[in-house]
Amino acid sequence: MSTSALSTDQRVTELTRARTFAMAVCASIAVANIYYNQALLGLIEANYPGSSAIGLIPTATQFGYAVGLLLLVPLGDLVERRRLIAAQFVVLAAALAFAAVAPTTLALIAASLVLGIAATVAQQIVPFAATLADDKTRGAAVGTVVSGILGGILLSRTIAGFVGSHFGWRDMFWLGAPLVLGAAALVRLTLPRHHPTQSLGYAAALHSLVHLLIEEPALRLAAATQAMLFASFIAFWTVLSLHLQEPAFGFGPEIAGLFGVIGASGILAAPLAGRTADKRGPHLVIAVAAAISLSSWAVFGGWNTIAGLTAGVVLLDVGVNAALVANQHLIFALRPEARSRLNTVFMTAMFIGGSLGSLGASWAYAHASWFGVCGYGAALAAAGLLLQLPTLFGRKAAHH
């Protein structure tokens, strides 16, 4: 296809409100799948008595998402996007069906790995929205899709907790399969075809990720900070359902899922963080957000009640989501022509952090119960804050 043909195609494929909403819905459905198992972990554990590998299920999902970000997301710059997105949704449906029938813990871990890889279709949709939008509406379009992703993350635990309590954990995965197939159909029906505008090969695209990481210290700092904060975030959600099952509480997965609704405060913090980053600079927002995340663990450890968990989860979600927006604000300003690949590096690091947060939290809970998890989560958030302190001192020195 010629360059002129590409330009003509792109002019007629206006990003309407209906298309933007469809992309937000599809991204929400996609990302929700990597969080279902966190609210269901207690039920899954009861289904596989004596298994010592239950904690690896959310770890495999997070690690799979990191692998998919690294290996699949760059394909969005190389192949026809609508077909790629629809194909990933079909693979995701197959992984959900496999998880629903998994006969052993090992099989469920394998299904969770594939599920995590395929769920990165959400991160194919974000740059697609940015590409279809014009310069005046790009920020609004991307913001709408990202809000869909945050909503999917939050509501996934609530839905999974309800379905798991009333029908069983396998039924949640069975429900997820037709939802993602519906998203694939929505993509085919509402979104335009979009061919790549450059001839960069797959190997070259992957190789450029290394160059970006080497050449952009701000990208390295943003990725490392968000990895620590997201690890802290995932540590909490990995063990919450197990903690709530303890005799002191005696609650099932439905209550654990309701904490996702409480976390909706994180969505409200995102636009405020973006506006503050525009006015005061992203580094200040990131440091404050890291401090808020750290304070949540002091609340979790010192106020181990439902009220304390509620207050802590508000602080944790506000802090992590505010940092996410400010860090993306920072990296997207580095190289506008490489935003998809910058996001690949950033999000890959973030979800590798998530997998380590899940793994470490499972180990800490098994060996030192809830307060061990609190110490682990606090250490991760503190690491994120410490990484940002030199940037604040550097800014003060520059002003003097």
Image (spheres, grey):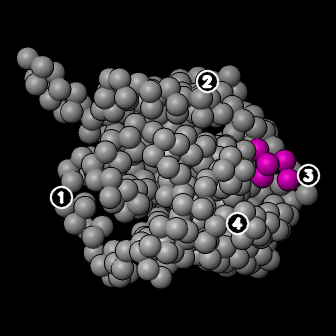
Give the spatial CA distance, label 1 vs label 4.
36 Å
Viewer-nearest residue: 128 or 165: 128
Q: Residue at x 64, y 67 (%)?
A: 192
Mark 1 or mark 4: whose residue is earlier in sequence: 4
Mark 2 or mark 1: whose residue is earlier in sequence: 1
Q: Tell me the SS state at disc 2.
A: helix
Residue 215 shows which numbered tag?
1
Residue 166 shows which numbered tag?
3
Q: Tell me the SS state at disc 1.
A: helix
- Circle count: 4
Viewer-nearest residue: 57 or 393: 393
Q: Is residue 190 above or below residue 270?
A: below
Mark 3 or mark 1: whose residue is earlier in sequence: 3
Q: Amino acid at mark 3?
A: His
- The residue pinned by badge 4 equals 187
Span colored in magenta: 158-163
Left or right: 334 as drawn, with respect to 231 = left
Mark 2 crowd level (few <14, some 14–19, many ≥20, 10 Å Cα): some
Give residue 28's position: percent from left, percent from top: 67, 52
Left or right: 340 as drawn, with respect to 40 = left
Give the spatial CA distance, label 2 vs label 3.
27 Å
Answer whether labels 2 and 1 touch (C-beta < 8 Å): no
Image quarter for residue 352?
bottom left
Mark 1 crowd level (few <14, some 14–19, many ≥20, 10 Å Cα): few
Mark 4 or mark 2: whose residue is earlier in sequence: 4
